[in-house]
Amino acid sequence: MTDAQRSPIPPPPDALPGLWQRVLDLLAAAYACVLVYATHHPKPAELVGPDAPGDKTLHLIAYTLLGGAVAAAVASRGGWNWRSAATVFVALALFAAADEITQPLFGRFADILDWAYDELGLVAGIGAVTVAVLLLRPFITPRVARRGESTAQ
């Protein structure tokens, strides 16, 4: 990459290398697509099998994973803070609401409790990433600084 192609604004000192950012973006986008397919499939029992946990547990797990994947993708760019977490939560809460509202179009039943469990899952996933960032930031920031990138003061 030439200097002309680089952004004039250096990445935050806690940003991961670009490859990891792209991998996390792809993972979050792919999981969101799989989740939309699974939540709109007319016969969900075909997807999860007869021994699957209850519906609310599935919602909690699914949205914990989504919240974690999207939060990790956003956090990989550095500068993760409470505003970043709140923005991700609001965006995904709206996504979850749209996901729930559109289910009747595919022969499914929309349930406000499903959406509530989606929100609990988002809090768990985003919270897990927030804890991970707080624990890992001291190790990531010095490594980036050693690579020769500027650590903005």
Image (cartoon, rainbow, N blue to C red):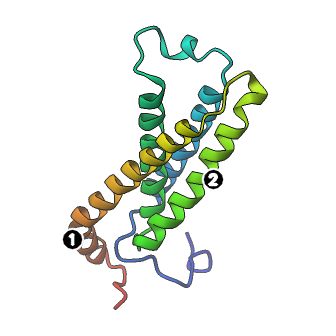
- Say few, some or many: other residues with alpha carbon within 10 Å of mark 2 (under 14 / 14 to 19 / 20 or more): few
Name the quarter where the N terminus is drawn. bottom right
* Residue in front for this viewpoint, 19 or 49: 49
**Tag in front: 2 or 1:** 2
117 sits left or right of 111 in the view: left
Does residue 110 lie above or below 64 as drawn? above
**Residue at the disc numbered 1:** 138
Q: Which residue is drawn at 62% across and 37% down?
A: 33
Tell me the SS state at disc 2.
Answer: helix
Tell me the SS state at disc 1.
Answer: helix
Q: What residue type is labelled 2?
A: Leu
Does residue 148 lie above or below 37 as drawn? below
Q: Which residue lies most toward the top here? A: 50
* Residue in front for this viewpoint, 144 or 106: 106
Give me the C-alpha separation between circle 2 and circle 1. Answer: 33 Å
97 sits left or right of 131 in the view: right
- Give the percent coordinates (x, y) of residue 46: 57, 11
Q: Which residue is drawn at 26% across and 68% down?
A: 137
Q: Which residue is drawn at 59% across and 58% down?
A: 91
Q: Which residue lies most toward the right here? A: 105
Q: Which residue is drawn at 52% across and 83% down?
A: 9
- Give the percent coordinates (x, y) of residue 15: 39, 68
Image quarter for residue 136?
bottom left
- Give the percent coordinates (x, y) of residue 130: 33, 61
**Residue at the disc numbered 2:** 94
Task: Choose the circle earlier in sequence order: 2 or 1.
Answer: 2
